[in-house]
Image (cartoon, rainbow, N blue to C red):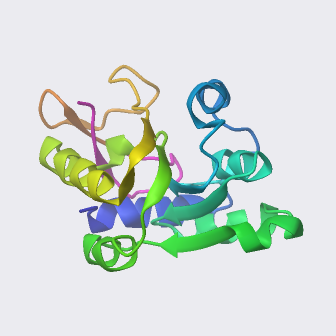
Amino acid sequence: MLNKNTIDSFEDLYKRGYDKTYLNIELVRLELLFLEKNKNKTLDFGAGHGANGIHLLKKGHKVTFCDISKYALKTIRKKVPKKYKKKIKYLHLQNIKQLNKKIYRESFDNIICLSTINNFNSLKKFKKIFSIFNKILKSNGKLIIDTNLKKNNYKVIKRINNTTILTSVNEKSNLKLKMCFP
């Protein structure tokens, strides 16, 4: 589902030490509105630096941190307080086959996918990931997704079509990736 350039771009970004300690402020609001009473298994899909999932851990959720970057997951492991170690899982995804094998065995009460969905570089891939989310989300589960805006701070190297650009997640890297803005 994700192409090699996307995976390599994020591996490079986190390998170089990219990290954030602050969480998505909208998640705080949404957690209070929708997830407060649903604190069971939560998938942080595209966990990145881990601040969102760590916030949910501290609020009582059992979190599976899922990312394409082993370096991002390594960063998260260092940041998670020891008292939460039994409430977490880590899932390093390198391709869609792994997603089918590893995640389909589980179901989740909540899925959060923040600032990640644009990395699926086509509308067809969006539909595929939504289909997967539909299969792994429990019937009364909550799905929280945000998308970056088309007009954002990503440098447009090339415009591929109305919804897709070629860009880079790190100015210090020569790695390019497609991002889609539905």
> From what the image shows, is residue 146 above or below residue 177?
above
**Residue 114, horizontal then vertical, whole percent:** 49, 40
* Any part of residue 167 in sight: no
Is residue 21 shown to the viewer in this render? Answer: yes
Main SS class of the magenta portion in the image: loop
Q: Which of the two residues, 139 or 82, is positioned nearer the viewer here?
A: 139
Residue in the image at 64% along x and 24% along y: 29
Q: Is residue 128 above or below residue 147?
A: below
Depth check: 9 or 76 in front? 76
The quadrant in which the C terminus is found is: top left
Q: Viewer-proximal residue, 154 or 174?
A: 154
Quarter of the image holding residue 105? Answer: bottom left
**Front-lying residue, 156 or 150:** 150
* Residue 106 locus on image (x, y percent): 42, 70
- Percent x, y for residue 113? 46, 45
Q: Residue at x 63, y 62 (%)?
A: 16
Q: Is residue 134 magenta-colored?
A: no
Q: Give, as a single range, the part of the protein colored magenta.
A: 168-182
- Which residue sits furthest top? 151
Q: Going 57% across and 62% down the picture, which residue do you hit?
A: 65
- In the image, is 47 to the left or to the right of 174? right
Task: Name which quarter of the figure residue 147 lies in.
Answer: top left
Is residue 170 in the magenta section? yes
Compared across the picture, whether 115 is left or right of 88 comes to left
Looking at the image, residue 56 sits to the left or right of residue 41; the answer is right
Image quadrant occupied by the N terminus: bottom left
Q: Is residue 180 above or below residue 30?
A: below
Residue at position x 34%, y 48% in the image = 119
